[in-house]
């Protein structure tokens, strides 16, 4: 498994794979790898001949005051987790490779951003200023650096996946986008690098996020037609955790990510929640189709 540190080295690696007629997959991550990331890697190995995992804690998707500095950086441990999985290369660039002008006097930051409009108006986008602009910009850069045929993401970050899929479509990028279902702990809690911040008591309570979105899914399956009733059911489930501070519980259309006023039969919707335990912010979601009447 090669560890590549520069964009040049990464592009040369992918060019060689392409010349050899190989299909390349990219799994973008910020490291601190857990079973959720490893599920994406396994899917990538099924989809392509050559698998690249990028590990880059992207400064432009963190707002001031968020956990950029504290975010776990564990490259050696991450490499050990990837070793048995048939990964061909890890792309782990320093910030100066991905943002060459950042901090320089002549050019204090990037001048070019990729911005997908409207899809960030609700859910996490309503609370995290410029977060998705940072995500779309870095993923566009990673796609140019790694030149994959296919890129694999987790549906755990549902809004991110829908926005990136739209970016690829709108910008005519020649890459297949795959969204892998969320990998969970036995309690139902979605695996997340941020779970490391939780106390034992918080971790136990954090299972309510999954309960909330599965409750919404069960209600839709049982014929519930009022999105507000789904929101109330999710809020009730979240309130079972005494230390949970709910940021949002929303039901939106799965493509436009706009709130839905009525559930249309056959429509795909997304029920999503974000909850703080202390300073730790957790998210979860469920995609679902409204049953045909
Ligand atoms: P991150 O390192 O948190 O930026 O995540 C990198 C990729 O892994 C993203 O596409 C995430 O959606 C995905 N991911 C994170 N947690 C999970 C999980 N529990 N199940 C599936 N995919 C996940």
Image: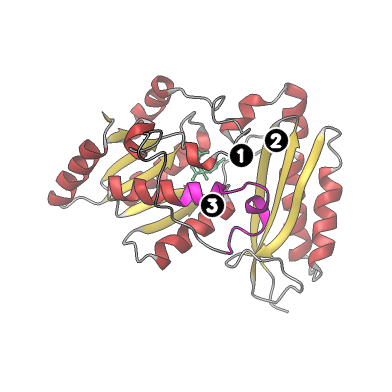
Residue 160's mark?
3
Q: Position of residue 37 (x, y in %)?
A: 48, 38
Q: Specify the label residue 187 is tagged with.
A: 2
Residue positioned 34% across, 54% down in the render: 150
- Is 3 on the left-hand or right-hand side of 196? left
Q: Which residue is mark 1?
A: 184
Q: Residue at x 79, y 43 (%)?
A: 246
Left or right: where does residue 16 sit relative to residue 146?
A: left
Check mark 1 vs ligand 1: CB closer than 8 Å? yes or no: yes
Residue for point 61% across, 48% down: 129
Q: Is residue 63 left or right of residue 225?
A: left
Q: Is residue 180 above or below residue 4?
A: below
Residue drawn at point x = 36 percent, y = 34 percent: 104
Q: Nearer the viewer, residue 206 or 85?
A: 206
| Helix, strand or loop status at disc 1 | loop
Q: Is residue 271 visible?
A: yes
| Image location of residue 273, percent across then percent down | 71, 49
């Amino acid at each position: 498994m090669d560890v590549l540190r520069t964009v040049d080295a990464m592009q040369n690696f992918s060019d060689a794979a392409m010349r050899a007629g190989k299909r390349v997959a990219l799994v973008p991550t910020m490291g601190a790898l857990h079973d959720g990331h490893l599920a994406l890697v396994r899917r990538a190995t099924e989809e392509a001949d050559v698998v690249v995992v990028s590990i880059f804690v992207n400064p432009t998707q963190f707002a001031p005051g968020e956990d950029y500095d504290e975010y776990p950086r564990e490259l050696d441990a991450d490499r050990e987790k990837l070793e048995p999985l048939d990964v061909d290369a890890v792309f782990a660039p320093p910030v100066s490779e991905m943002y060459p002008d950042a901090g320089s006097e002549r050019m204090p930051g990037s001048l070019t951003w990729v911005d997908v409009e409207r899809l960030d108006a609700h859910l996490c986008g309503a609370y995290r200023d410029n977060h998705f602009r940072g995500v779309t910009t870095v993923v566009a850069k990673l796609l140019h650096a790694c030149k994959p045929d296919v890129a694999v993401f987790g549906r755990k970050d549902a809004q991110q996946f829908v926005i990136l899929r739209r970016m690829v479509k709108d910008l005519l990028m020649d890459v297949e986008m795959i969204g892998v279902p969320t990998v969970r702990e036995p309690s139902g809690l979605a695996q997340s690098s941020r779970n490391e911040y939780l106390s034992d008591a918080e971790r136990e309570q954090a299972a309510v996020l999954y309960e909330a979105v599965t409750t919404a899914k069960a209600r839709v399956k049982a014929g519930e037609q009022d999105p507000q009733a789904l929101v109330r059911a999710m809020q009730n489930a979240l309130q079972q955790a005494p230390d949970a501070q709910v940021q949002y519980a929303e039901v939106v259309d799965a493509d436009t990510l706009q709130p839905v006023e009525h559930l249309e039969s056959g429509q795909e919707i997304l029920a999503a929640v974000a909850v703080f335990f202390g300073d730790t912010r957790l998210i979860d979601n469920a995609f679902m189709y409204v049953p045909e009447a």
